[in-house]
Image (tube, coloured by chain):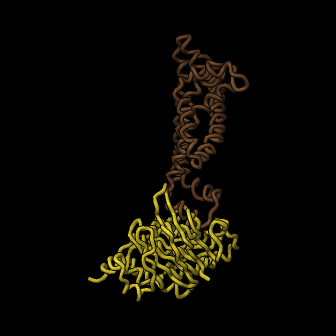
Amino acid sequence: MALVEFRNVSYQIDGKPILRDLNLGVEAGETLVLLGRSGSGKTTALKMINGILFPTQGQVLVDGRPTTSWDPIKLRRRIGYVIQEVGLFPHFTVGDNVGLVPKLEGWSAADIDRRVNLLLEKVGMPPGDFRSRYPRQLSGGQRQRVGVARALAADPPVLLFDEPFGALDPVMRLELQQQFLALRQDFQKTSIFVTHDVREALLLGSNIALLAGGRLDVVAPPLQFRQARSDEARAFLACIDN
Amino acid sequence: MRSDLWGDILQLTAEHLLLVLNAMVIAIAIGVPLGIYLTRHRAARPWLLGFSNIMQTIPSLALFGFLIPIPFIGGIGKRTVIVALVLYALLPILRNTLIGILGVEASVCEAAVAMGMTDGQLLRQVQIPLAAPTIMAGVRVATVTTIGTATIAAAIGGGGLGVFIFRGVASVDTVQILAGAVPAALMALAADWGLGWVERKLSRL
């Protein structure tokens, strides 16, 4: 059974269709990349998984249950979320930011402590140096590392990434992409990753879903995706053919 | 100079301070929750902000006059004064609470919601702490204005430093006017400085 599943999902705002009849499943352990241009509906699809948005038609199922029947707070605490702007709490230290969801979930101080140290270590931010700093004292790349650690904190089975590395310089972006792959090796999480960068999609995805104008255009693993014949897929693939 | 003038100054200053403190505590107790309510209920914004705006446009002496015939909250004396001062102080507190919370970076709130914070947790742990300097700025402005406005309280028997000013004006006695005006001005300066310090402490981040 798919861990996350879109079933005939459509979404409209004021009658304007954003997503049309989307059918898509994400298996446990998979990294599904939602690829598409701005306005293709990929972020909208992502926000339906953790119940920030709900479909106007159809259903999104997480663990086989429609998001509408989940308690939204419970649902969100089982799903890590990483966004481009990071959204760290400026008044919390790095350690408190990472420990946020475990604390909301009522973990003991000692457990939170251990988890925060482990995760900061894993994302390449030695806790001794960084734990008690504030987000404003970090570079953009460091902030996003903390953002990733925060998303992993309560050990959620599913992680959502909304163009997480889009605002970083190319060198930093590559570093974080490599780290994403290393973390996937370590934690074996199911991830849904939104991007408009086809290179990033091919590098990180175990499956790529290309969205165009709110419709699903192509779904394929990276190797097959390179052979895709649709106009939109070829437009994207043309970006790497030079 | 009368020998008991200093004693009077001390007593009326204390009275003045008490009026202002009472009014500010009530205004904060109403204004901050109401401002928070407005962040969650967009439709109520024009009504409540409009009401507090109109309150500010009514000349203070007239507002005191209007309140006198109203039962329970009106009449002659301190209670009416405090009601009027609260109505004046409401707008800056209400508005700054609303602006402060709406001004919290959208990505921070988005992350908080997506992490599974309840609305109460979002408010207490994120929005209020981050809006605190802005809310405090509203309290500071309201306090300084209230200290000045409270001098008119004497017109309806509310006491305070206005007693000196009204008496001085009636008897063309500059010393009396100054005995009211100088302590009121010093109190306003002290409040501005003290609350400004708190505001800066809160906005260290």
The relative height of residue A13 versus residue B162 in the rendered view (above or below) is below
Give the letter of the brown chain: B
Location of residue B13 in the rendering, given as x and y in whole percent from the top left corner: 62, 28
The relative height of residue B149 versus residue A137 in the rendered view (above or below) is above
Residue drawn at x 37%, y 81% is A199
Q: Is residue B187 visible?
A: no
- The shade of chain A is yellow
Location of residue B130 in the rendering, given as x and y in whole percent from the top left corner: 54, 55
Residue B32 appears in which quarter of the rendering?
top right
Residue drawn at x 67%, y 67% is A69
Location of residue A78 in the rendering, given as x and y in whole percent from the top left corner: 63, 73
Q: Residue A49 versus residue A128: which sits nearer the camera?
A: A49
Query: Farthest residue toward the right?
Result: B72
Residue drawn at x 60%, y 58% is B122
Decide if residue A50 is on the left or right side of residue A109: left
Q: Residue A80 versus residue A197: which sits nearer the camera?
A: A197
Location of residue B164 in the rendering, given as x and y in whole percent from the top left corner: 59, 19
Decide if residue A224 is on the left or right side of residue A45: left
